[in-house]
């Protein structure tokens, strides 16, 4: 199969018929073999009934229905599990992404050899104050921390090599960071394409201001897990040792001052309490790293590494 189009949705019953018809038109024009996987993330409108009707008219359309709203990451993760195409395209269901971009996004994977191609909505039709400016700040932070030169990490329109989506697990709100997850999994060829951003035709946005706060928290989490997930002692142990050593040196200085220079009593000096506090923090950090190391070493996934190919070894 050439393409799997994965579309998470929540309360988008108005847009689905037009969107799937547009995708079908593009597929027929380019003679692609394809499937459209619609993931209903606990919609409270008639989205699932619409999906059932669309499925009856077009056997290429498939559906997954959640019992409740789990979020976009969970929807994409299930869609990736079900996808069978050699190239997977993700897009939003609100008609703001154009299916006409699909052939070029696929070509960049198949012919140019990219592992991921991310869309860049260079010209946006969103509210500048509530979406555009926070989005620019978020993307700048993501670029700086990940060293991936993308302008729009959160663009829903992306294309992936099949091996990429089968190698990463998305949870929480990590859908914004699939390129970063892919990079940590060893996929380094990440490209970008300017795509059309269309004004919303149906419904209202499902995301509020809290997504920007959660986005920065998730960015810190994924950066840490990517670097130290399998070796937490390298982070906590290092900082714990530095803190404890710093506190011990302060304590040693106070002791020498007391016995050799007849300074004021140790416990009467503020620096004494600073030394104790720093040593306690250092001990806690070291213990956190030790416990994290025990958990990591007993994890059933501790040796799950991505192997690209094998020679002379029975598969």
Image (cartoon, rainbow, N blue to C red):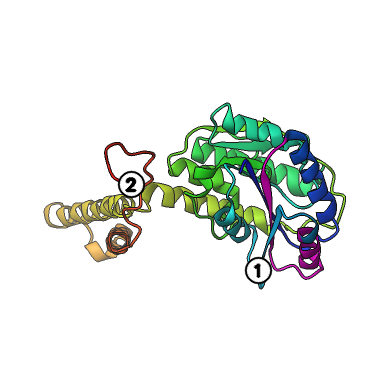
Label of residue 66 in the image: 1
- Label 1 element class: loop
| Mark in the foreground, 1 or 2 | 2
Q: Nearer the viewer, residue 124 or 165?
A: 165
Farthest residue, direction top: 112
Q: Quadrant of residue 284?
A: bottom left
Q: Nearer the viewer, residue 3 or 12?
A: 3
Q: Nearer the viewer, residue 55 or 192?
A: 55
Q: Which residues are magenta?
A: 31-55
Label of residue 35 in the image: none
Residue at the spot x=82%, y=61% of the render?
13
Question: Does residue 128 appear in this view?
Answer: no
Label 1, label 2: how far apart the Cα atoms are:
35 Å
Farthest residue, direction bottom: 67
Residue at the spot x=15%, y=52% of the render?
261
Q: Is residue 219 above or below residue 74?
A: above
Q: Quadrant of residue 16?
A: bottom right
* Left or right of residue 83: residue 18: right
Circle 2 sits on which residue? 315
């Amino acid at each position: 199969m050439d393409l799997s189009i994965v579309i998470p949705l929540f309360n988008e019953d108005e847009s689905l018929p037009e969107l799937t018809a547009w995708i079908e038109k593009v597929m027929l024009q380019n003679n692609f073999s394809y499937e459209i996987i619609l993931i209903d993330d606990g919609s409270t409108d008639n989205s699932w009934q619409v999906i059932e009707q669309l499925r009856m008219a077009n056997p290429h359309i498939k559906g997954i229905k959640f019992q409740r709203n789990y979020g976009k990451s969970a929807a994409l993760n299930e869609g990736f599990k079900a996808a069978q195409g050699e190239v997977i395209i993700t897009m939003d269901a609100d008609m703001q992404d154009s299916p006409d971009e699909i052939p070029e996004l696929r070509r960049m994977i198949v012919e140019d050899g990219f592992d991921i191609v991310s869309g860049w909505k260079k010209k946006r039709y969103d509210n500048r104050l509530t979406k555009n400016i926070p989005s620019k700040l978020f993307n700048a932070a993501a670029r700086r921390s990940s060293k991936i030169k993308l302008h729009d990490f959160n663009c829903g329109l992306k294309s992936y090599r099949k091996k990429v989506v089968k190698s990463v697990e998305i949870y929480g709100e990590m859908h914004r960071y699939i390129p970063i997850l892919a990079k940590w999994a060893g996929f380094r060829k990440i490209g970008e394409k300017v795509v059309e951003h269309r004004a919303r035709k149906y419904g209202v946005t499902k995301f509020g201001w809290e997504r920007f706060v959660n986005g920065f928290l998730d960015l810190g989490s994924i950066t840490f897990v990517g670097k130290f997930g399998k070796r937490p002692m390298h982070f906590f142990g290092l900082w714990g040792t530095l803190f404890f050593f710093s506190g011990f040196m302060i304590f040693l200085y106070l002791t020498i001052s007391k016995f050799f220079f007849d300074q004021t009593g140790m416990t009467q000096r503020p620096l004494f309490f600073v030394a104790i506090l720093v040593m306690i923090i250092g001990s806690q950090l070291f213990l956190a790293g030790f416990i994290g190391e025990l958990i990591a070493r007993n994890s059933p996934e501790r040796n799950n590494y991505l192997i690209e190919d094998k020679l002379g070894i029975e598969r």
